[in-house]
Amino acid sequence: MADQRRAWQRLAGPLWRRIRLLVSRGVLKLVDDSLKLQGVQVTLLGGEPAQAERFQQYGITSHPHPGAEAVVAAVGGARAHLVALAVDDRRYRLKGLARGEMAIYDDQGQKVHLTRSGIVIDGVGKPVNFVNCPDVYMDGNLRVTGDVYDGVSSMQGMRDIYNDHDHAENDSGGPTDPPNQGMN
């Protein structure tokens, strides 16, 4: 019986080691974002340094900080061909989302959050820019708590100029009264 057990361990041992090494956790050390498929250097469990290609979802990309955590798989069981399947960073992850919600976020707190009641864009005090958009369409109301600018002056500035304007009378040559109705 003991001989059979040793024979089984001798046969299954290498296979078991390959299976055990197929998927591992690691900590990001460096990111090379200049490649067609992002390259990462990770330290795997046990302190093993490794290089891996990082797969990301199509249309979504990120450049994680060192210290982020990764799940790394060995393609075909070969540690020489590692791929990072997922990278997350618990230091910056949003918490408290309701079931079904999702968000895109960064380490500064900027986010686009699809909530159960609508979409929230948080620029954390930084501007939000629409670039290369010849037209922006909206089928609802626009409500602004700040001022609206046309590139030269504010909407309130335009109202002030309009409400204070006057012009010469055709007959008497004197100024007209201010407009009856202001521009609100």
Image (spheres, rainbow, N blue to C red):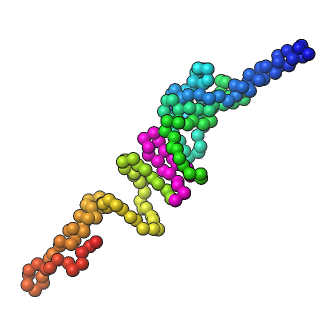
Relative to the observer, which residue lies in front, 117 or 86? Answer: 117
Which of the image's four quarters has the N terminus? top right
Residue 68 lies, in percent from the top left, at: 53, 32
Left or right: residue 39 versus residue 109 is right
Relative to the observer, which residue lies in front, 147 or 30? Answer: 147
- Tell me which residue sits at (65%, 24%) in the image: 80
- Tell me which residue sits at (48%, 33%) in the image: 65
Relative to the observer, which residue lies in front, 71 or 115? Answer: 115
* Total labels drawn: 0
Left or right: residue 169 versus residue 120 is left
- Most extreme residue toward the top is 3
Which of the image's four quarters has the C terminus? bottom left
- Most extreme residue toward the right is 1
Residue 82 lies, in percent from the top left, at: 64, 28
The question of residue 103 being in magenta is answered with yes
Relative to the observer, which residue lies in front, 128 or 117? Answer: 117
Residue 177 occupies quadrant:
bottom left
The boundaries of the magenta stretch are: 101-117
- Most extreme residue toward the bottom is 171
The question of residue 114 being in magenta is answered with yes
Residue 35 visible to an observer of this rendering: no
In the figure, 166 relative to 34: above or below?
below
In the figure, 72 relative to 119: above or below?
above
In the figure, 62 relative to 147: above or below?
above
Residue 108 lies, in percent from the top left, at: 42, 41
Left or right: residue 12 versus residue 42 is right
Residue 8 lies, in percent from the top left, at: 86, 19
Residue 165 occupies quadrant:
bottom left
